[in-house]
Image: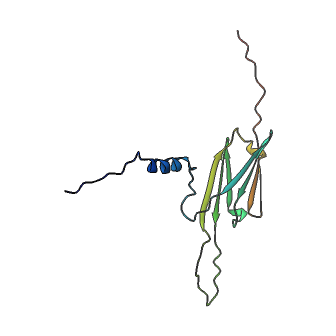
Amino acid sequence: MNQIRLPDVLSLENTEELWRSLLRPLRWDGPQGVPQIKLDVHEDDAAYTVKAEMPGVKKEDIDVRIEGAQVSISAEVKKSDEKKEGTRVLRAERYEGFVSRSFTLGCEIDRDKATARYQDGVLELRLPKQQSGAAHKVTIE
């Protein structure tokens, strides 16, 4: 009669690999080949500055929306359809489709004063913080 051996999950050789895998940072870049919008976010007393890497995107195809403290950036990435007669595509690695990224900042944004600029594949947003009114003292009767 054959005996079935189950792996010893508590053995030292398995435990070391288990701990290593738990300590690795979790990361998911989305489906294979889909580019992600990479961000740099800076803050000063008056505003946030966001730089978003978006190479190969036309500024007309970028959409930025602000709702309270949440910012959403989306864009449609298009390839040119230029084909030369007598040639064939051997490999096409450039992405075509829709990319988006949303994030929440520490305080609400003054949407009316927000500005955006796109140059050399980088979208730069200047997002002024909403000025909260001065504290209001309530009189107790």
Instruction: Please report the residue visible at 63 percent of the width from the left and 77 percent of the height from the top.
Output: 81
Instruction: Please report the residue visible at 68 percent of the width from the left and 62 percent of the height from the top.
Output: 61
Q: Position of residue 93 (x, y in %)?
A: 60, 72
Q: Is residue 42 left or right of residue 84?
A: right
Which quarter shows the C terminus? Answer: top right
* Corner quadrant of residue 118: bottom right
Residue farthest toward the bottom in the current orientation of the protein: 86
Q: In this view, does 61 lie to the left or right of 134?
A: left
Total numbered badges shown on the rendered structure: 0
Instruction: Please report the residue visible at 75 percent of the width from the left and 22 percent of the height from the top.
Output: 136
* Corner quadrant of residue 121: bottom right
Residue farthest toward the top in the current orientation of the protein: 141
In-front residue for pair 122/11 = 11
Which quarter shows the N terminus? Answer: bottom left
Q: In this view, does 63 lie above or below 43?
A: below
Residue farthest toward the left in the current orientation of the protein: 1
Q: How is the image coloured?
A: rainbow
Q: Position of residue 6 (x, y in %)?
A: 32, 51
Q: In this view, does 134 lie above or below 101?
A: above
Q: In this view, does 113 lie to the left or right of 10?
A: right
Q: Where is residue 72 in the image (x, y as percent from the top left)?
A: 65, 50
In-front residue for pair 63/19 = 19
Q: Where is residue 68 in the image (x, y as percent from the top left)?
A: 67, 41
In-front residue for pair 16/54 = 16
Instruction: Please report the residue visible at 68 percent of the width from the left and 47 percent of the height from the top.
Output: 66
In-front residue for pair 123/13 = 13
